[in-house]
Amino acid sequence: MARARRLDRHETVLVTELDAEGVGRAEHDGLKLRVRGALPDELVSVRVLRRRRRQLEGQAEVVCRPNAARVSPPCPWTARCGACVLQHLDPDEQRHRKRAQLAALFEDEGVRSPARWLPDVCGTSTGYRRKARLGVRHVPGKGTLVGFREPASSRVADVDVCRILLPQVGEHLADLKGLLGSLDAAAKIPQLEVACGDDGVAVVLRHLEALGDADRERLVAYAAAAGWQLYLQPGGPDTVERAWPRAGAERLHYRLPEFGLSFAFHPTDFVQINPEINRRMVSLAVEELAPRPTDRVLDLFCGIGNFTLPLATRAAAVLGVEGSAELVERARENAVANRDLLDGREVAFNVADLYAEDFDPTTLPKADLLVLDPPRSGAETIVRAMGILAPRRLVYVSCHPGTLARDARLMAEGGYMLTAAGILDMFPHTAHVESIAVFERV
C-alpha cells in the first residue's frame, strides 16, 4: 500500500478537522493524511508529498468544495512557505478556533470555565511581525534564497516578499537575496535575524567563515544606505558584534504610549513580536490586575520590563524577576531611562532562574498582585506555591494553551478561581495560541 503512494500521486479526500498545527486531517484507503492548505469539511485534491511518522503529508491543490470561512490568502507564496499555515482561513474564524481550543483544554483539565471571556485582543493580520529568524541558502545556478522554511521541510522557501514581516523588512527580501548572493561567502551564510523597533531595523547575519574585506564593505554599504543596523555573528550568540553604524548605542526602541514609556532592547533580546498586540496586551493586563496606589506587585519572567514598568506607574512597588542577566540589565536600563515617569515609585529587578531545580518559590517576596509571563513550559513550580505566595489576584500571559490549562488546574487546587480568559492574536495566520487569564483568590 505504501509503495502505491508516489510523491507525485494526486488523491481527492474529505478533510475532517484541523490539527493543533493548523493542518487539515483526512483518511484515504485506510491511510491518514495531513493536508496543508485545507479546511474542515472541504473536498480537496491533494498532491502527496511524503510519508512522515506513519502518515502521508500533502498539499491541497484544488478545492472542489470549499469551507464557507475560506478566504484568498494575502500572500501569493503561502503554499510555498511554511510560516503561516492558516492564511486561507478567515481571521475571525482563526480566533474562534483558538478560543475553542483553549476552552477545550480547560475542560480537559477539569477547570471551570471563566466567568468572563475577554474580547479578543487583535489587530492587523499582515505586516505585524517585528522579529524573525530567516533561513539563507545559496543554490548554485539558481541564486540565494532568504525566507522561512518550506512546509514540512528544512529547505528555504523561495519568496521575494513576506506579507507577515513589518514592511520595512518584508518588502526587501528580494534585495537581501541579491545582496547575499553577490558575496564571496554566499555559500557560508545559513541564517539572518531581523529585528524592528519603532525607530529602525537591525539585521544579524550568521556566517560560517570569516568575511573578506570586499564582503564586509558590500554589507556595510547596504546597511548604511537602508539606515539599518548591521551585526555579524561568526559563532555562537556571544560572538554577535555590530559592524554598522560604528558608534552609538546598540539598541532599538519601542513605546507604550498609554503609559508614556519607551523601551530599549538589543536586536537579539526577546521582545514580543507583534507591537500592536503587545501594546493592547499590556494595557489589558494592567486593567485586569487593577493595582491600587498602595499595592506591591511581583512580575515573574519579566524580560526587559514590558509589564513591570507600566505597573510601576500605578502601584507603590514592583519587583521584576527574570532568569537572564542580560535581560535584567536591559530592564534596569529601561527603568533609569523612564525614571521621570515612575514618579519616585519603587521598582527593582532581580536575576533568578525560576526553572532551576533548587529554586524555592516560597523565597519570593509577598505581593498583593502577581504577573506571570512564562515560556512554553509554563509556571508549574510557581503556581504550586500560590497558596503560600497568596496574592489576591494574578494575571497569567501564556504562549502555550496546554501548560496554561494545566497551571489553571493547579491554581484551582491552591485556592484560586479562573475569573477571566481571552485570546491574544499575537501570531495571525498561524496555529500558535497566545492567551491571557485572570485568577482571584477565593
Image: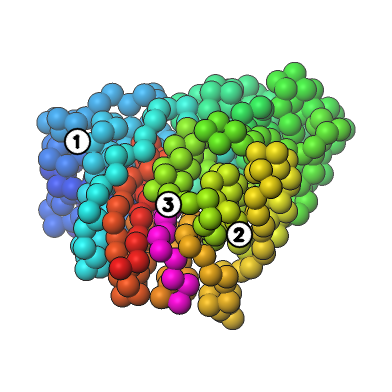
Q: Which amino acid does label 1 sit on?
A: Ser
**Mark 3 surroundings within 10 Å by alpha-carbon count, few (fewer than 14), some (14 through 19), many (20 or more):** many
Dividing the picture into quarters, in which one does residue 316 lie?
A: bottom right
Q: Which residue corresponds to the image point at 29% horizontal and 60% vertical from the top-left?
A: 418
The residue closer to the viewer here, 343 or 349, is 343
Q: Which residue corresponds to the image point at 50% horizontal and 24% vertical from the top-left?
A: 161
Q: Distance between the residues labelled 3 and 1?
A: 50 Å
Q: Earlier in the sequence, mark 1 or mark 2?
A: 1
Label 3: which residue? Answer: 289
Secondary element type, mark 1: strand
Q: Whole-percent x and y of residue 182?
A: 71, 26
Q: Distance between the residues labelled 1 and 2?
A: 56 Å
Label 1: which residue? Answer: 45
The residue closer to the viewer here, 196 or 66, is 196
Q: Which residue corresponds to the image point at 29% horizontal and 64% vertical from the top-left?
A: 417
Q: Nearer the viewer, mark 3 or mark 1?
A: 3
Label 2: which residue? Answer: 319
The residue closer to the viewer here, 330 or 166, is 330
Seen as rendered, the residue at the extreme top is 225
User: Does residue 350 lie above or below 212 as drawn?
Assistant: below
Q: Distance between the residues labelled 2 and 3?
A: 15 Å
Q: Which span is picked out in magenta?
A: 388-399
Q: What residue type is labelled 2?
A: Leu
